[in-house]
Amino acid sequence: MKVTVGVSGGIAAYKAAELVRALQRQALDVHVVMTAAAQQFVAPLTFASLTGHKVITGLWPLSSGEAGSGEAELDSSIEHIGEAQSTEALVVAPATAHVLARFAHGLADDFLTTLYLATRAPVIVAPAMNVNMWEHPATRANMEMLESRGVRIVPPESGALACGMTGSGRLAEPEVIVEAVVGQLHRRNDLAGEVILVTAAGTREAIDPVRFLGNRSSGKMGYAVAEEAQRRGARVVLVSGPSSLRPPANCELVSVVSADEMRRAVLSRLDQTTIVVKAAAVADYRPCVLAEQKMKRTGPITIEFEPTEDILREVVLSKRPGTLVIGFAAETENLLEHGRSKLLRKGADAIVLNDVSRPGLGFDSDRNAATFLTPKTAIELPEMTKHELASRILDEVIALRRPASFVAETGLVSSNSTLRE
Ligand code: CTP
């Protein structure tokens, strides 16, 4: 299996040689592309010797000012298309702030950036830079954009940096990058043929023409699940409450506002759905009466609320046999106990249990941790980005389809998961 390592121009470029070796130990056929700046740090010959392949150093044959790389002079202006189609994964390590910015904005002014635009293979980037550059809002915005487009980010580690500062910005260890690459390769197209309906974000229950009862859900978790599912080959229907997030391209977006609208959108699509993932934070109550005019401030008021329908329960009762139903549960105390009773009450195949009281995780954060709870198991999914968590959740959902005998025979349980009976 061929993977392409893109090396860009930072001091960590020398560490890419170690990464190449580590990828080769996974029986991967590694090819290397270098930016012009990377060649100021490491000679292309290093990678040519390690890989046994010519190193691609530029878009044009013998372009002036380009460092030579022996056989690398054979680069051609259409080679990026061939490379883009033949590679199974593009791994950029180290990825400089400049390369990330060019990826984010679609600039294609050298081989690596052109390859990034042309390939449909999974892209994994491992940034390395000065801590201030890493934390700059421009870099953060670029990372967010890339992540929302499905690029897998292997975040830099904290420690002493080459610039003399201490903080986040050191290239992740080769084995961490390799794990991300292998994860992406295994997951390619494993959801082909599935139709996944994902609900996301919070619902809003109108009180009067200008006010509503809402909640803090941003939709990030559900959108990440939709995006990952789509990347892994599923057809995705995203039923979303109001959210400022950009929906993944090519998924069917159904925008709703209230719990009742969400309910109708979900139930009417159940017969074409093979997996339902209910990440939305649905309002449990709505006002009994909707005021027709804006309510005036007069003094203390009492608003009477009635419960909304439990959509997850209705899905479980009216789904086609074989359709998997995964709920989410946001809890603040007695997690496992509440999670288990919710799982039983709702009758779902699994519940993704979130501790929303943990600072920095959950609502509106880019990171989360969860427990994937089935009637028999509780699988810990430790803190990670919501995109990575979405992928891990989908791994566990796919595992539910496998017959128990297969799991017993192969001992196949997703990596890094702790199983507790
Ligand atoms: N859910 C739903 N319809 C509702 C409320 C919740 O489909 N009216 C779904 C959510 O999308 C989520 C799961 O049920 O997948 C659990 O939601 P949560 O708010 O944690 O649980 P509740 O059912 O509201 O139970 P409680 O308020 O007692 O915690």
Image (spheres, rainbow, N blue to C red):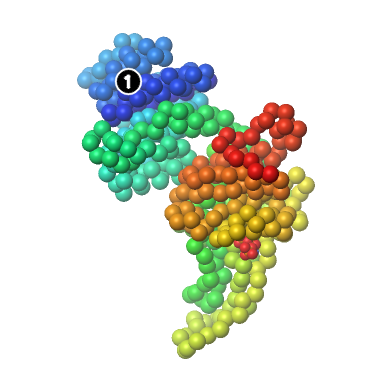
Foreground residue, 49 or 341? 341
Count of number-bearing discs:
1
> In which of the image's four quarters is ligand 1 placed?
bottom right
Residue 275 left/right relative to 137: right
State whether residue 199 appears in this view. Answer: no
Outermost residue to the right: 321
> Which residue does the image show at 31% across and 17% down from the upper left?
44
Residue 346 left/right relative to 286: right
Q: Secondary structure at mark 1?
A: loop
Q: Is residue 86 above or below residue 71?
A: below
Q: Is residue 37 above or below residue 357?
A: above
Residue at label 1?
A: 57
Foreground residue, 344 or 44? 344
Pinpoint residue 394: horizontal percent, then vertical percent: 60, 41
State whether residue 18 appears in this view. Answer: yes
Residue type at mark 1 is: Thr
Pinpoint residue 387: horizontal percent, then vertical percent: 50, 44
The C terminus lies in quadrant: top right
Crowding near the residue tagged with mark 1, few <14, some 14–19, many ≥20 C-alpha atoms within 10 Å: many
Pinpoint residue 324: horizontal percent, then vertical percent: 70, 46
> Which residue does the image show at 28% across and 28% down from the upper left?
11
